[in-house]
């Protein structure tokens, strides 16, 4: 690809993750988007993988059930001249550090909210990661076909709970059974749920924001009510500001129903207009790597254990930050300084050959990995060494203590722990007083995967004792006194040897802060 073509190809990319609390409608909306993109022909294809009730102890079974989730961790389609990459962020029990890290690999995020429930805890956490990165967030308030909360109330909640300005791009006309349509503030039109007397779905609005001439909707009292609400929103709310959207300071809000495919195209069209193309990435040395730079570079944000029990290989997901990916290319692995050829033993995952041959900055590729890669690794071509900024560490919330079942097998136990921790599967801590190993994670699934892989890949059965949820807070080592530790605030050290307390709950943390007001406690993300 020449320089011009590369630039053009990169400009076409739109890479985003959909974040939501379980059941808000992420799968349904993803499905609709794939339908528009012509990737799936029937609704239900994505849904099919959301089968519950799998045997938790059996990782292969989990993978089998999630079958297409491995390949569909990245979904790609072309729409309106853009190439769209959607990254999956698992919810439910699959929630893990990988979910957070996925947000490091996207250029924007779509937040799906259930109109009856508003902002839920999991959404809030994911949202905070987006905010920290300053990436644009687009909000889709779903399930308008059901009775939900007042739109005004939902917009206020967005601002209050998430601390971000919001701008309604459209406004519901009724809800539940009484849903008539959307008052499209941005496109200055009304979008109807069913065609009007003229057979139209879209009705233009005049300068005053009203329907010109006669229309059946005008006879409905809901029409005047919506005009009033929109007036109120325009007066009291934020102004539309594309700059603020780009910086993640203002979220455009769209209403609709994913299930009824209502408002989804309107959302997608506006999304593609305002979502950014791939941007630059900073290296540790402070150099900005532009996406259309000729040399290839990328980083690994997720490693997934393979489905095939006979192969120990895993799949490393790479976000391409610059240049173009080519089959068989030689790359440098920054951490080790080694050269790797991305061919033969390292095959590539993609839905089609075409997808891979055209992978450029903004795209995600999956490489079969036999142990070369770690999360956060940078690969690049060219003479100048590149190491992208470290991926942030996330504060684990769930903890278990872990031991080898068979004390005679300490060696494989230690080897397994070391490798899986390095890979970023779980966080490892060690108790100051007893030396006992403690694992930390943001989701239960991480422990299950750890246990399964210890047994299958390292032949080491482990005993895990749940310790429940804890609040992890790092302490300045100079202020540390081991006597500060108690059963309610366990003193441990992390893999780098830095001390931290695992507080039993908020009360324990507050009690500690009252007792030692001079001690600084910090959280990771
Ligand atoms: P998730 O991926 O965010 O967990 O949510 P998912 O899309 O699976 O949707 C959760 C439930 O909400 C599903 O119902 C889905 O059909 C429903 N849903 C999604 N969008 C809408 C919408 O716009 N309106 C209404 N009324 N429902 C919606 P379910 O009963 O859990 O599953 P199923 O029986 O439909 O398979």
Image (cartoon, helix red, strand yellow):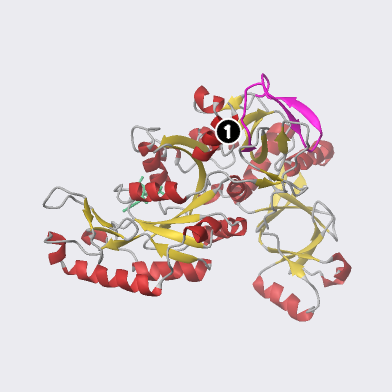
- Mark 1 lies on residue: 360
Q: Secondary structure at mark 1?
A: loop
Is 522 displayed left or right of 179 in the figure?
right
| Residue at the spot 78% in from the left edge and 27% down from the top edge | 339
Outermost residue toward the front in this view: 4
Is 243 displayed left or right of 253 in the figure?
right
Q: Nearer the viewer, residue 12 or 121?
A: 12
Is 311 displayed left or right of 173 in the figure?
right
Residue 337 within the magenta-colored segment of the rendering = yes
Quarter occupied by residue 508: bottom right
Point out the stretch of residues depicted in magenta: 321-346
Density class for disc 1 (Cα within 10 Å; few <14, some 14-19, many ≥20) is many
Quadrant for the C terminus in the image: bottom right
Residue 87 in view here: no
Residue 484 position within the rendered picture, expressed as x and y whole percent measured from the top left: 83, 72
Is 351 displayed left or right of 288 in the figure?
left
Quarter occupied by residue 145: bottom left
């Amino acid at each position: 690809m020449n320089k011009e073509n590369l630039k053009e190809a990169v400009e076409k990319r739109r890479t985003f993750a959909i974040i939501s609390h379980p059941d808000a409608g992420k799968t349904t909306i993803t499905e609709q988007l794939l339908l528009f993109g012509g990737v799936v022909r029937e609704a239900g294809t994505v849904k099919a993988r959301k089968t519950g009730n799998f045997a938790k102890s059996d990782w292969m079974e989990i993978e089998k059930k999630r079958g297409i989730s491995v390949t569909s961790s990245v979904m790609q389609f072309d729409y309106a001249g853009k190439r769209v990459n959607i990254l999956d962020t698992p919810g439910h029990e699959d929630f893990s550090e990988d979910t957070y890290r996925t947000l490091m690999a996207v250029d924007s995020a779509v937040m799906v909210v259930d109109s009856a429930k508003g902002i839920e805890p999991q959404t809030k956490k994911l949202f905070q990661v987006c905010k920290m990165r300053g990436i644009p967030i687009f909000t889709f308030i779903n399930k308008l076909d059901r009775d939900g909360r007042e739109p005004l109330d939902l917009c206020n909640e967005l601002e209050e709970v998430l601390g971000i300005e919001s701008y309604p791009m459209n406004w519901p006309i009724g809800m539940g059974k009484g849903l008539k349509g959307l008052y499209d503030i941005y496109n200055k039109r009304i979008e109807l749920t069913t065609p009007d007397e003229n057979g139209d779905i879209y009705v233009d609005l005049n300068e005053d924001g009203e329907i010109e001439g006669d229309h059946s909707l005008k006879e409905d009292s809901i029409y005047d009510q919506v005009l009033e609400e929109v007036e109120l929103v325009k007066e009291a709310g934020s102004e539309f500001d594309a700059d603020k959207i780009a910086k993640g300071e203002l979220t455009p809000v769209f209403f609709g129903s994913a299930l009824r495919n209502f408002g989804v195209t309107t959302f997608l069209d506006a999304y593609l207009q305002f979502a950014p193309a791939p941007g630059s990435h900073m290296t540790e040395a402070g150099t900005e790597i532009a996406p259309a730079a000729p040399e290839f570079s990328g980083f690994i944000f997720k490693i997934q254990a393979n489905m095939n029990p006979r192969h120990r290989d895993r799949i490393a997901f790479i976000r391409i930050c610059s240049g173009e990916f080519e089959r068989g290319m030689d790359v440098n692995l920054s951490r080790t300084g080694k050269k790797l050829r991305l061919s033969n033993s390292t095959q590539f995952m993609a839905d089609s050959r075409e997808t891979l041959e055209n992978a450029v900055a903004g795209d995600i590729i999956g490489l079969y990995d036999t142990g070369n890669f770690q999360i956060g690794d940078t690969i690049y071509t060219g003479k100048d060494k590149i190491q992208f900024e470290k991926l942030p560490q996330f504060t684990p919330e769930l903890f278990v203590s872990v031991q080898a079942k068979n004390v005679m097998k300490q060696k494989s136990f230690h080897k397994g722990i070391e490798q899986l921790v390095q890979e970023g599967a779980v966080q490892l801590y060690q108790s100051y007083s007893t030396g006992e190993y403690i694992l930390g994670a943001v989701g239960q699934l991480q422990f299950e995967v750890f246990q399964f892989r210890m047994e299958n890949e390292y032949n080491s059965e482990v005993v895990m004792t749940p310790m429940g949820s804890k609040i992890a807070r790092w302490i300045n080592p100079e202020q540390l006194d081991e006597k500060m530790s108690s059963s309610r605030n366990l003193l441990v050290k992390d893999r780098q040897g830095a001390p931290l307390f695992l507080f039993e709950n908020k009360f324990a943390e507050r009690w500690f802060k009252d007792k030692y007001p001079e001690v600084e406690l910090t959280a990771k993300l």
